[in-house]
Amino acid sequence: EFENFYQSVTDLEDQLFEEADRCNENNAQKQQGNNPVVMEYENGMLGDLITMAPFHPDWEFASENGNDSDDHAAIQYEKKAPYPMISLVCTSAITEAGEIVSETIGQQNAETLTHMGPHALGQLFRSAISPRRQQQQ
């Protein structure tokens, strides 16, 4: 199910950003830059300014060499969410933060999840999705 969701997000990203770029270009041509509603992108591409990050209940990182350790199991929860959702992030925030900050965030996430452990994370996750499943029945 995640693969279909991920593909849908990718398709939406392409369609949404391409349409926004076309609309912006058309408005800019019509208004010749005098309309305050018209956004002037630095390089003309909205997709270069926004990154879409999908989260999903079925998200799993690929297992390396059949790694089923508790640490690996805990990390599986980093991109899980009770509902399929998309986070919109300013690409410049990621770029400006730099690789070191991104790595530090990833390390902090791994430490927190590993400290909590897969059992506690699983219980927390199941408690978040159980109301949704009860509503569906």
Image (tube, helix red, strand yellow):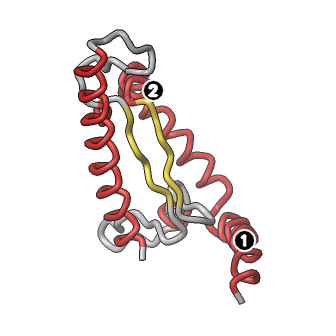
Task: Out of 35 and 95, give the one closest to the viewer.
Answer: 35
Tell me what residue is drawn at x 54 percent, y 69 percent: 57
Question: Pointers 2 and 1 in contact (CB under 8 A)?
Answer: no
At x 68% / y 56%, what residue is drawn?
116
User: Where in the figure is residue 16, as x and y percent of width and height?
Assistant: 34, 47
Q: Where is residue 6 in the image (x, y as percent from the top left)?
A: 36, 63
For label 1, the SS is helix
Crowding at dot 1, Cα within 10 Å, few <14 / some 14-19 / many 20+, comes out as few
Q: What element carries label 2?
A: helix
Quarter of the image that includes the C terminus:
bottom right
Residue that numbered label 2 is attached to: 101
Seen in the image, is 103 located left or right of residue 13? Answer: right
Image position of 82 with respect to 100: above or below: below
Q: Badge 2: few (under 14), some or many (20 or more) residues near its Cα, within 10 Å?
A: few
Mark linked to residue 123: 1
Splitting the image into 4 quarters, where does residue 7 fall?
Answer: bottom left
Using residue 120 as the reference point, say whether residue 64 is left or right of it. Answer: left
Task: Return the residue nearer the eye: 90 or 65.
Answer: 90
Split into 4 quadrants, where in the image is the N terminus? bottom left
Number of disc labels: 2
Q: Vertical placement of 16 versus 4: above or below?
A: above
Query: In the image, is 109 to the left or to the right of 60?
Result: right
Q: Label 1 amino acid?
A: Gln
Amino acid type at mark 2: Val
Residue drawn at (48%, 68%) of the image: 69
Quadrant of the rendered structure where residue 30 is? top left
Residue sticking out furthest to the bottom: 137
Image: 60 above or below 34: below
What's the distance in space between the residues labelled 2 and 1, CA to CA?
A: 30 Å
Q: Where is residue 40 in the image (x, y as percent from the top left)?
A: 33, 17
